[in-house]
Image: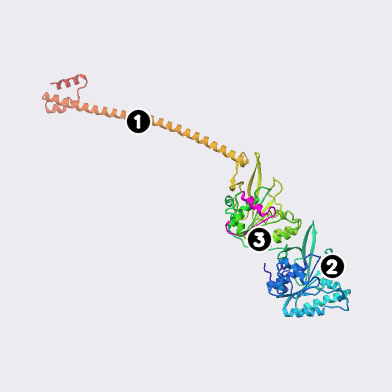
Amino acid sequence: MTITPTLASPKILTGIRGFDEITRGGLPRGRTTLIMGGAGSGKTVFALQSLVNGVRESNESAIFVAFEESVAQIISNASAFGWDLPRLARKRLQFFDARLSPEIVKTGEFDLIGMLAILESIAQKSNAQRIVFDGLDVLLGLLDDPVAARREIYRIRDWLARTGLTGIITQKARPAAVDHSDSDLQFIVDCVVIVRHQVVEGSAFRNLRVMKYRGSGFAGDEFPITLTTAGLQLTNRGPVELRYDVSDERVSTGLPRLDHMLRGGYHRGSNILISGAPGTAKSTLAGLFTAAACERGERTMYVSFDEGAAQIVRNLQSVAIQLTPYLRSGLLKMYSTRTRGPNVEDQFGELRAMVRLHNPRCLVIDPLSALSSKLAHIASADAAQQFLDFLKVEGITVVNTSLLDGVNTDEATATGISTLADTWIHMSYLVQDGERNRALTIVKSRGTGHSNQVRELTLTDNGVTLTDVFVAHGKVLMGVARWQWEQEGIAARQRNEVASELKRLQLQLKQAEAAARLQVVQTEMEARSAEIALLARTMGEASDLLDTDRTALLEMRHADAEAMVTGPRARPATGPTARRKSISRKAP
């Protein structure tokens, strides 16, 4: 996040994450800031880190004045932060050993005029903009006269104002009295920062609070401090504007049927929560997501608080999920550790530092509930929320698993991050007919018309599958019960097929019988038609024969033409007698 100091209140950035945000731009430029706190609270680290960041990020020069520890000790103690102080000391960061013995201070009247003159010369030569007086209270404590001590404090303040240097003074204070210290310094300086180191339930907590800041607004709450490999950082619990890019791109869950239920998978850069009781395959789903991300060639990070990396890899191999090739190629980074008491701020700080170091596109935290179950401190709970917001700003797709105690748990989460999750998948058990089966449901998925159906999750040597569940007689069936129901369904279908085939054969037989009867009727009809046609032909032939016989008879009788035309033909003879006469006439 880029902080731009306002012109109305000139400030200088410390580069300490979180602090520049709560002070709205850093420390007052050209003025004096007091860092007060007990032993081990981080006063020296804060002061030195602000100088290092100024040298590195702003190309400034700086001076560190040590009244308590030697320069060698300071450089050695800071080596854990990777600042490379020896290299910086050869360039723009000057160390000045100002330790004095009590004998020297008490001999005659003592003042800081000579030392300040030397420091001014160094500042002019190096064009320094910042200076730290570390452990000034050690020197002031050697002065028996409080008036003399107050005089030297004002001398330093005036010297800083005249030289234009931005000054930081560190001072010890008892933890119980740090908020009520009567030190003259806190009234003289322009900005007072209190750092506190305390133990709660056996765990150490560091906190920071800006007590005073002349000419500027600031967040006056107490903020947790985290010491990481990069130095000190704050968890900002103040109002944060949620501004980050969103994507319509989908990334695979690693399980095709789950992708289908989510209309293509998770949204890129989203926060996914997988909750459930122990053994419901939460880590398996996280492993599927990890393998799918690596398969796409994306840098992935897997953080576990339950198991070692080797054990996770071995366990996932039992369900055909192979992570070893990606570990060897460096595409996958795995980090396993145990939680350390209720103070999880340091661990979130370490996670943040590792994310910045490895720059993954996808991240798995398994389980996040291992941290958030210890969130007895409000600041720690806020640290979890801030970490998830940080991942969203970075565009990292993160899968968090959350362990729910008990077997018959509902869909509540002990982590308190369910409202932050963009997609929430809940795993549960169904105990039925002497079996325990795993069920998967999608509680929510923002921006997705997801499936609302329950699926059975099965784990085999060949991989992970999602199976449709059966509902029979008002009961959800899984496992053997579902298999038995399927077998009964198969048998019922077979019986129906046999009955249908018998019915088909019966209908075919009846159809054949009807066709045979129809054929008989058709044949009979054809016979009747032929008989009718024959009768008609016979009658016609008989009529023609009668005409021929009559004509022949008339000719034999030598009848006249009129008789042949109008004679008895109009009334032909009928009966047997006429037929016999006709036949007799034809005889030779």
Residue that numbered label 1 is attached to? 522
Among the 4 quarters of the image, the one containing residue 570: top left
Among the 4 quarters of the image, the one containing residue 133: bottom right
Residue that numbered label 3 is attached to? 391
Q: Answer with left or right where residue 402 lies relative to residue 504.
A: right
Q: Earlier in the sequence, mark 3 or mark 2?
A: 2
Q: Residues within 10 Å of mark 2 (few under 14, many from 20)?
A: some
Residues shaded magenta: 295-318
Q: Residues within 10 Å of mark 3 (few under 14, many from 20)?
A: many
Q: How many marks?
A: 3
The C terminus, quarter of image = top left
Front tag of 3 and 1: 3
| Residue 440 visible in this rendered orientation of the protein | yes
The residue depicted at 14 percent of the width and 21 percent of the height is: 587
Q: Residue furthest top?
A: 577
Q: Secondary structure at mark 1?
A: helix
Residue 387 in picture, x, y percent from top left? 69, 60
The N terminus, quarter of image = bottom right
